[in-house]
Amino acid sequence: MNNWKKLLLSLTFVGLILPVTSISEAAEKSAGSENLVPIREIAEQNGAEVSWQQKTGEITIRKSELTIVVKVGEKQAMVNGQAISLNNPVQLTKGVTFMDGAFLSETLKAAPEDIFVSLISGGDGQEAAKYVHTSVSGVLSPTLLSQLWGALEGQNGKITSEAIAKHVENNTVHRNVTYTFKTELTRLNITVRMNHNGLVDDLHIAAATPDVYQKPSYDDPSAYTEQDITVGQGDLALPGTLTLPKGEGPFPVVILVHGSGPSNQDAAIGGAKPFRDLAVGLASQGVAVLRYDKVTYEHTYKVASQPKFTLKQESVNQVNDAVELLKKNAHIDSTAIFVAGHSQGGFAMPLIIAEDKQHDIAGSILLAAPSSSFVDVLTEQQDELVERMKQLGLDTDVIQGQADFYKNVAKIVKDPNYSVDHLPEAFPLQPAYWWFEQRDYVPAELAKTQNTPMLIIQGENDVQVSMNQFQTWKSALQGHSNVTYNSYPKVNHLLSSYDGLSIGQEYAEPSNVSKAIIDDIAKWVLKSN
């Protein structure tokens, strides 16, 4: 079977509506020259543009992200750089070019991302890889793509043959096409990130969960505007949003830095979007906010292809790019650029300040930020969760097993026999380099050597970063007169007020960042300005 026929047949997978004439009938008709059609006429009927180079005989057909290139006399077409065999050579008759009609019509109706998903669902990684951009081809290899569907079914149960939903969303970096599939155990979102050339630039795969988020009472849309922006350049550029207060400006600005794990610019988790809350809340009080998708979210597989990926690459480099971007913005006061890091973002804050060679950052805000080494925090976090579950009378068998697992991870990381130059062969959490590269980094110790104003905010009901970490910040920085400390009795790790004892289960319910935190940040920034 010709390659193009296989691709078209696979489109039934995503529930596309095919023409009344069956694919097999179209294929049979195209075998003879009687099914040659005028290229320009059929292309324009399908919303495509056609250009022709008379000297070379090359015809280019473009529609959105799809590019088809054919040449008079040749029996193949290049579809987004992929060579596809034709049944008949392209012909020129009386100044009109003709080619296989079935191929042209169906290819113009097919989206590259649909074809790509169809191919990986069938385990045809060799063909699917032809739709992948070189920036990520090293990891989205034919082998990985051939095995990906089977791996997903191994984790989630058999996947339905057709997507139950398809959603397209554009940002400044990618055209994101999300397919929702039903599995035996859950619903799965597979997001194909397409670049501006119509090629697969990355993937993001996650459980499909309902969006139950509710806007906070302090969200006043009349008080701010939002602009799409791009942080950084090249293969790891990030889409983001600059939320600006209404008025003349220039305004002080806060750059938001994510916690651990892949996360979008809202830092969405369960029923919460804390970064969105911070943006609209602060902008309503005269403080601009820049937030962006985390690099491990927007470029998941590209990052996974880097065996020596570091905390600096994950959480620091983007801040440098964001600062440079804001310094050029007429609406921003370049002398009042602040950075707020949540959880791991706060953990990385001393590294961010250390990289601020030109002293552009006017102050840093730590939101539920660990002060100790990462593995020490990890161990403490597990103990805290077990203790809280016992207080609530809950079964701790499963969570104790998880705690023991992470304690073993910490033990391996602390083993002096291992280092970045001698990693353990079977480290349970990859990439191993990330853990060993920063094992001796203690945020509070580095912060001692710095003098940038700080606002340290901590929820007293936080199960992930305990009050012990807050107290360590206080002890380490007791000689610093430009540090402000605020803690909030009911606030959990998502910076929202919760009446019960937090063990993370409440994250699934709608919640918002405490208005008291919004008010205190705005007051501190405006006072420091």
Image: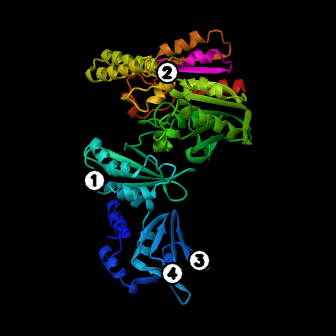
Count residues near mark 2 (Cα–Cα under 10 Å), then give few for <14, some for 14-19, many for 20+: some
Q: Identify the residue under disc 3.
A: 56
Task: Using the image, determine if residue 104 lies above or below residue 491.
Answer: below
Residue type at mark 3?
A: Thr
Please identify the quarter of the rendering in which residue 28 is found: bottom left
Q: How far apart are marks 3 and 2 (CA)?
A: 60 Å
Mark 3 secondary-structure assignment: loop
Is residue 155 visible in the rendered image? The answer is: yes
Q: Distance between the residues labelled 3 and 1?
A: 47 Å
Residue 354 screen position, x and y as percent: 65, 25
Nearer the N terminus, badge 3 or badge 1?
Answer: 3
Q: Earlier along the polypeptide chain: callout 2 or callout 4?
A: 4
Instruction: Tell me the residue that label 2 is attached to.
Output: 439
Q: What stretch of residues is rendered in magenta?
A: 440-461
Q: Name the residue under label 4.
A: 41
Q: Residue at x 36, y 29 (%)?
A: 426
Q: In this view, does 27 lie to the left or right of 92?
A: left
Q: Mark 1 points at which residue?
A: 160
Determine whether 252 is above or below 106 in the image: above
